[in-house]
Image (tube, grey):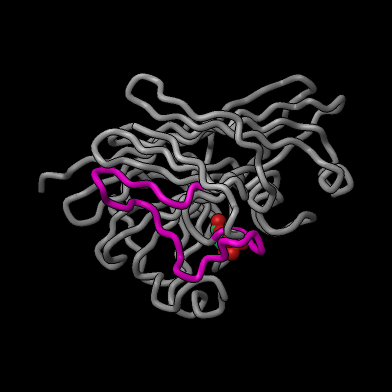
Amino acid sequence: MSVEKINSSDGSLERIILKGQNKSSVEIYLYGATVTSWKSGGRERLFLSSQAKLDGSKAIRGGIPLVFPQFGPGELPQHGFARTRKWEFLDAFEHGESMVAQFRLTENEETLASKWPYKFILNYTVDLTATTLSTIIKYENTDTREFSFTSLMHTYFRVPDISSTVVRGLEGSLYANKITGADNVAEDRENVMIAENEDRVYINVPDTVSIKYGKEQVSVRRFNFEDVVLWNPWAEKAAEMSDFGDNEFKNMICVEPGTVSNRISLRPGQVISCGQLLAVNDVLA
Ligand SMILES: O=P(O)(O)OC[C@H]1O[C@@H](O)[C@H](O)[C@@H](O)[C@@H]1O
């Protein structure tokens, strides 16, 4: 078990690498506090585009970008400012079976001058075990006014083949289809598969959904996040994105825990912790 800090002496961005038991590891860039790699049993579990910008010029395309305080388009830049700010690295340490790293983001002059002008503290904890990765944000209102926000963990999973990848646990939930504009559609499939550009916000989702591919399954458990966004840009939209390889849509699926259909409100001094626990399980059949 070890902690490695990569400083930017060669011009690359600073990052932290935690190594845990059984060939597990996680890499976190201070830029956006973006997790860019999670290995369990020596295998990469997250998708990072070969075209991702890793120089701080754009939000990182892949891994786990953090969306705050605005999901999607709006008064702020798309998906807010947390994914393009440099976070403070607080500490990394061994804790029982886990390796843990902690990061912090607070307001700055730019955010105070933005359309979301509040004082806040986000404390982000990344916890790695041999078979799990948990990412939790503690959101704190340090302003004198109540504020509200939307937030999400934009998790990109690496899959061997999207055409045989199944998402389970969504059956019975309602979703908004952001491609067609249809709202409150009931999901009636036990096994959700993607075969075109999909962009859906699922509400009323059970705590845990899972992604099954081949003999493996990764479960995604949410804490205090209400919704799950399911996204794959497919061929045409992928080709329009400068930081996404043309054929890479075949090897990724975004399953994104967040609260985006409602807003989270915090009064002055109030705190809420929200996050996700990703766990690798073998599937027998
Ligand atoms: O290109 P971005 O800003 O990283 O966003 C990627 C996608 O993120 C998803 O969460 C949204 O639902 C999509 O609408 C969006 O296209």
Q: Position of residue 275 (x, y in %)?
A: 51, 34
Instruction: Give the quadrant of residue 72.
Output: bottom right
Of residues 203 and 14, the one nearer the viewer is 14
Please state if 26 lies on the left or on the right of 261 as rendered: left
Q: Position of residue 44 (x, y in %)?
A: 32, 53
Type of secondary structure dominating the magenta stretch: loop
Q: Is residue 41 magenta?
A: yes
Please report the residue visible at 33 percent of the width from the left and 47 percent of the height from the top: 39
Instruction: Residue at the far right: name it.
Output: 113
Q: Quadrant of the N terminus?
A: top left
Does residue 202 appear anywhere in the picture? Answer: no
Please state if 260 lies on the left or on the right of 285 as rendered: right
Please state if 228 lies on the left or on the right of 43 as rendered: right
Please report the residue visible at 36 percent of the width from the left and 42 percent of the height from the top: 25
Of residues 177 and 256, the one nearer the viewer is 256
Instruction: Give the quadrant of residue 75.
Output: bottom right
Instruction: Tell me: residue 234, above or below residue 226.
Output: below
Q: Position of residue 156 (x, y in %)?
A: 44, 55
Q: Is residue 48 magenta?
A: yes
Does residue 58 appear anywhere in the picture? Answer: yes
- Identify the magenta region: 35-60
Please report the residue visible at 55 percent of the width from the left and 29 percent of the height from the top: 91
Instruction: Give the quadrant of residue 128.
Output: top left
Ligand 1's quadrant is: bottom right
Please report the residue visible at 47 percent of the width from the left and 52 percent of the height from the top: 36
